[in-house]
Amino acid sequence: MSVRAFLKQRAVNIALGGNYSLANWYDQNGKPRNFACRTSRVSPFRMIIDVPVVGRVGDSISSYFSDFGKLDGHISDTVPGGFLLELAVTRAMRERLSNQLTWLEKRQNDPAIIDSRQQARIVPACPHSSLILADGSVHTCFVIDMSISGVAVSADVQPDIGTPLAVGGCVGRVVRHRPDGFAVKFSELQNRSELEWRIARPAGRTNTIESRVERLASTDPSQWIDGKPASPSSETIELDV
């Protein structure tokens, strides 16, 4: 089925975070490479997923969502930054998925239900951004979540811990690896009201951002340990991504 046809069908527009692996994509240890992803539209038969690595029509996908569990299938259509996943599940699983979607849609429409984590973490409306490294190279990335002090992303690159880079217009260092990506601690706290705009800036090199990344690259990366500078300073921030 095409994405255009699916948009005309009954489905739930809902954003749920998860992870997925593509057939024939492996990490340096020979294990399937996991990437973060987020649903945008779901039915018991198929779902549109925003992703950092799109793949090709026909590729087999293995995915996991905390609300649904493990879901396998294949790509039937692609869009920029996403694909349509045809679910290969049993009839009983479809019925359970249908019940879950009904409940999730009700929860989504109930303003009385609030996720307290949103006070610290923000899930951006647009999950796609760009990474700019100190050598000037630009890579697309998927934003898992973010806060005023840092961001978690998934990409087809996995920079070493301590690597300086920019995510959109926000400069920082890689401070932790995750199974589906890595966390970046910003070099300075961001303005919450401008954070999503700064993160979602279009991919591209600018002299200002490049110079800030290069300047950060000249500092001692050993000062950054698991999300914090090793010694107290004005930049000591608790990482919450």
Image (cartoon, rainbow, N blue to C red):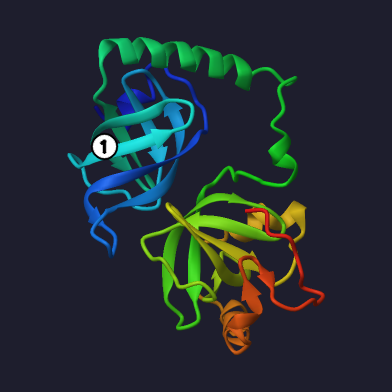
Q: Which residue is mark 1?
A: 77
Compared with 155, 213 (above or below) is below
Query: Is residue 112 found left or right of 176 in the rendered image?
Result: right
Relative image position of residue 158 (x, y in whole percent): 41, 66
Which residue is found at the position 57% from the left and 61% from the top?
201
Q: Quadrant of residue 28?
A: bottom left
Q: Quadrant of residue 98?
A: top left
Which residue is nearer to you in this view: 25 or 48? 25
Query: Is residue 17 found left or right of 227 in the rendered image?
Result: left
Compared with 50, 43 (above or below) is above
Which residue is nearer to you in this view: 145 or 29? 29
Which residue is found at the position 40% from the left and 28% from the top?
69
Kindly state the secondary structure of the residue where label 1 is placed.
Answer: strand
Taking the view exactly as shown, the residue that stands out farthest to the right is 234
Examine the rendering and report whether any part of residue 164 can be seen: yes
Q: Residues within 10 Å of mark 1 (few under 14, many from 20)?
A: many
Which residue is found at the position 40% from the left and 12% from the top?
96
